[in-house]
Image (tube, helix red, strand yellow):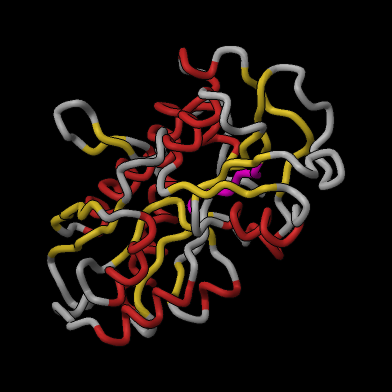
């Protein structure tokens, strides 16, 4: 789950031209990232796949609306929502108090902790004192970035535009450790050939002050009709087995959280 820096989002949204309302419609435009496996990524042919992608399509099907997926870089994902490039964001976005000031959220659709990873045996703990002076890689503008900046002040925080770039620099030896959502690291890196010889270390990190209440769907402020319809659709796909069917494609355990 991730978090986007707010200042640029507010400014961009304030000056952008609107493209239409999300309410009372028979189609829905969903903003996705396409660079956060296994939640959202692109095949060699350019097809968008992943847990977030399947969830977005399932929600549109349940709401009986035509779904259009709009790919957007993470750094600009909130400004583009405010500019009405799309109507909602399904991109593993964490529900945080700061973000609630500029967008509205549905209920969560999953909730998993953050974890550190590094070369096997390199660290046996993840305290700020242990990682002081170490280079820690993180995707820029996420809750993990915010957490590292606040808590790991004596570490060198190295920020990247995509999570894949974080993995590349870790395997190239330019980083000592990385922090991200535990599922993203596990499925998108540790279980791949590139992730051999690397592992998690330390504890789960899920303090709501930093990591929010889980991943939700963001909509523009005041679009209560759309938010309520999405909440109803989330509840329905969870109760009718669709959610679990999607989840089993990617994960062999419950990711919804308590």
Residue 219 drawn above or below residue 248: below
**Highlighted magenta segment, given as a residue range:** 109-114
How far from the left and from the top, in percent, is residue 179?
Answer: 62, 41
Residue under the image location 47 percent in, 57 percent down: 93
How far from the left and from the top, in percent, is residue 140?
Answer: 49, 54
How far from the left and from the top, in percent, is residue 234?
Answer: 41, 55
Q: How many marks?
A: 0
Residue under the image location 22 percent in, 74 percent down: 84
How far from the left and from the top, in percent, is residue 18?
Answer: 18, 82
Residue under the image location 63 percent in, 49 percent down: 157
Residue under the image location 38 percent in, 38 percent down: 51
The quarter of the picture where residue 248 lies is top left
- Direction from residue 130 to residue 145 in the image, left or right: left
Residue 56 drawn above or below residue 163: below
Residue 3 drawn above or below residue 20: above
Residue 137 seen anywhere in this rendered image of the structure: yes
> What main secondary structure does the magenta stretch of the protein show?
loop
Of residues 41 and 145, the one nearer the viewer is 145
Residue 184 drawn above or below residue 118: below
The quarter of the picture where residue 44 lies is top left
The quarter of the picture where residue 138 lies is top right
- Direction from residue 199 to residue 221 in the image, left or right: left
Q: Is residue 210 magenta?
A: no
Residue ranking furthest to the right: 129
Residue 108 seen anywhere in this rendered image of the structure: no
């Amino acid at each position: 789950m991730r978090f986007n820096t707010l200042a640029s989002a507010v400014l961009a949204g304030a000056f952008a031209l609107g493209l239409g309302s999300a309410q009372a419609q028979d189609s829905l435009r969903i903003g996705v990232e396409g660079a956060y496996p296994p939640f959202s990524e692109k095949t060699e042919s350019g097809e968008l796949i992943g847990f977030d992608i399947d969830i977005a399509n399932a929600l549109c099907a349940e709401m009986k609306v035509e779904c259009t997926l709009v790919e957007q870089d993470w750094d600009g994902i909130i400004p583009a929502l405010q500019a009405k490039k799309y109507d909602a964001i399904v991109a593993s976005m964490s529900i945080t108090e700061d973000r609630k000031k500029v967008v509205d959220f549905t209920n969560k659709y999953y909730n998993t902790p953050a974890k550190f990873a590094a070369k096997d045996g390199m660290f046996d703990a993840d305290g700020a004192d242990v990682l002081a002076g170490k280079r820690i890689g993180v995707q820029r503008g996420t809750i993990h970035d915010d957490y590292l900046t606040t808590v790991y002040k004596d570490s060198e925080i190295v920020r990247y535009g995509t999570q894949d770039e974080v993995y590349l620099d870790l395997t190239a030896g330019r980083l000592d450790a990385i922090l991200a959502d535990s599922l993203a690291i596990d499925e998108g890196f540790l279980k791949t050939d590139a992730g051999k010889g690397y592992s998690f270390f330390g504890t789960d990190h899920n303090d709501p002050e930093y990591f929010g209440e889980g991943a939700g769907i963001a909509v523009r402020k005041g679009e209560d009709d759309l938010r309520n319809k999405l909440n109803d659709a989330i509840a329905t796909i969870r109760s009718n087995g669709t959610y679990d069917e999607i989840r089993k494609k990617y994960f062999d355990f419950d990711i919804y959280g308590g």
